Amino acid sequence: MSAFTSLPLGQPIPNRPHAVSCSIPTMRDVIGYEEKDPAVTQHLRSGYPRFVLHQFNQQLTTLFATELGLVEETLWLTSSTRTAADLVRELGSSARPTEYQGIHGVVHPASAQNDLHAKRYLQNTGGFLSSREAEDALVSRGELSPTAEQLAPLADAADTIRGVLVNAHAGSRADDILLAPSGMNAFHGAWRSVADLQAERGRTVWIQLGWLYLDTIAQLKRFTSGPTDYVNVTDVNDLATLKAAIATAGDRLGGLVTEVPTNPLVQTADIEQVAALIHAAGGRVVLDPTLVSPFNIRLLEYADVVVNSLTKYAANEGDVIAGSVIINPKGSDAAELRERITNRLDPVYQRDLRRLAAQIPAYESTVQRTNQTALVVVEYLRKHPAVNEVFWSLQPSTAENFKKIARRPGNIGSMISFTLSRPLAEVYDRILIPKGPSFGMVHSLICPFIYLAHYDLVTSETGRQKLAAAGINPELLRLSVGTEPVEEIIAALAAGLD
């Protein structure tokens, strides 16, 4: 029997209450989802965390709003009192923090503009209340029955997680591994701490190298001091432009942020050279290895901090969101950053911590299995007449850069993006691999990533021009290879490609 079956619109992936993905099986569904078509959205019981407010969060928010007597006001439940205070500052004097039954939140006058502003801020910074914390609050009030799931003992959970992450991040120490409730909260706490420290030195210019994940880009634009302090060097191989940007910034250079490799083009910069250039100019380096996992590449020696989404690969069953920050103990500001970042990160809810600890022992083996399978899938895609380009860790344009930091040959990660010689819908609708966002699970996943992440760019002429300038075809498909038998993964792809 095949590992793959067609999943209906809206089914969680995996089919569990806290799944981090959901099925969006046709391009019509994708467009309906992006355009908020009720015919599509009514079927969505869950969605990618931070983009779709979890059903438990919605239920608890409605309950609290009623009990608090809120009229023509919107309530957002947050991951901490710190995030609530930050959101109040973001929204202005019309917003106010609230705490009800031990859960923090923000209340503001209801309006489409305010609602969108608040949601985007919490999405960008990973500040939503944990869905498990919302569930536990509802269970305690008799509104729900508890979810049955495997949990590690709380007393050992954090140590279990850090023990695995020390092995993943070569050169790290347990004391330098800080945990966060999501990858974006990890980035927010880490980068803002580094940026604040550098700003105290008059260094406010930050360079984005390559096309990065949308919420990383959003934070860089939102929190740099002004438009001229955000600099985007699009081509990861363009060292001449990078050197010019460093020279222009001068002693105002704060540092550089990049993913290794980048999402979704899977491109790798010459990290050793890039880090040397930034550090020589007094900047700091923030690196993110999430796309392939730190078990595949060595980054810490080049970074001041490494941020990583543990939702990918570490939480390989696909039902936990979490993140980590790893401080380079040899970095110039290590002691200061350890204190600042610790104070800035939101806490991880204890049941999320326990659930992650139950899964993370399989982290390295999951990565190694997907490495081996992805190599075979890449060769299949490269030879298929319906495929135009394949983007992967060893694509010719940046292969040598990746090899320099790979921990061993064949460690390529599970992520493969590719473009087609046929219409996107014709292929996507027939592929049998589960179709939804996220990656790094035991389950293979495929999605039209640019449609889901940058629909505003896909649907405008200027947006498409911006994508083209970055070398991105909006019709690109992003495939995350899982641990299913490789012949079944290829057969599921062939259903759409052949």
Image (spheres, rainbow, N blue to C red):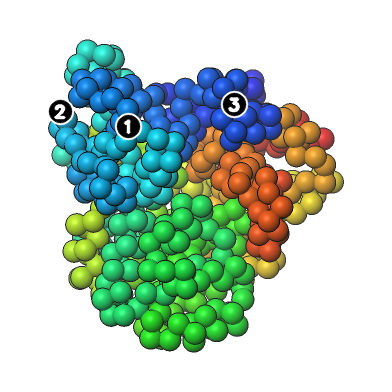
- Which residue occupies 60% across, 68% down? 234
Q: Quadrant of the N terminus?
A: top right
In the rendering, at what x and y percent does residue 256 appear?
44, 71
Instruction: Check disc 2 and report its element: helix, strand or loop.
Output: loop
Q: Nearer the viewer, mark 1 or mark 2?
A: 1
Alpha-carbon span between mark 1 and mark 3:
22 Å
- Sequence-first tag of 1 and 3: 3
Instruction: Check disc 1 and report its element: helix, strand or loop.
Output: strand
- Sequence-first tag of 3 and 2: 3
What amino acid is found at the position of numbered circle 2 in the picture?
A: Gln
Dividing the picture into quarters, in which one does residue 432 lie?
top right
| Dot 2 alpha-carbon crowd within 10 angstroms: few under 14, some 14 to 19, many 20 or more | few
Residue beneath disc 3: 37
Q: Nearer the viewer, mark 1 or mark 3?
A: 1
Alpha-carbon span between mark 3 and mark 2:
35 Å
- Which residue occupies 19% across, 36% down? 98
Q: Is residue 257 left or right of residue 419?
A: left
State if disc 3 and disc 1 touch (CB < 8 Å): no
Q: From this viewpoint, is residue 7 visible? A: yes
31 or 184: nearer the viewer:
31
Residue beneath disc 2: 101
What amino acid is found at the position of numbered circle 3 in the picture?
A: Asp
- Sequence-first tag of 1 and 2: 1
| Dot 1 alpha-carbon crowd within 10 angstroms: few under 14, some 14 to 19, many 20 or more | some
Alpha-carbon span between mark 1 and mark 2:
18 Å
In the rendering, at what x and y percent does residue 31 appear?
64, 33
122 or 364: nearer the viewer:
122
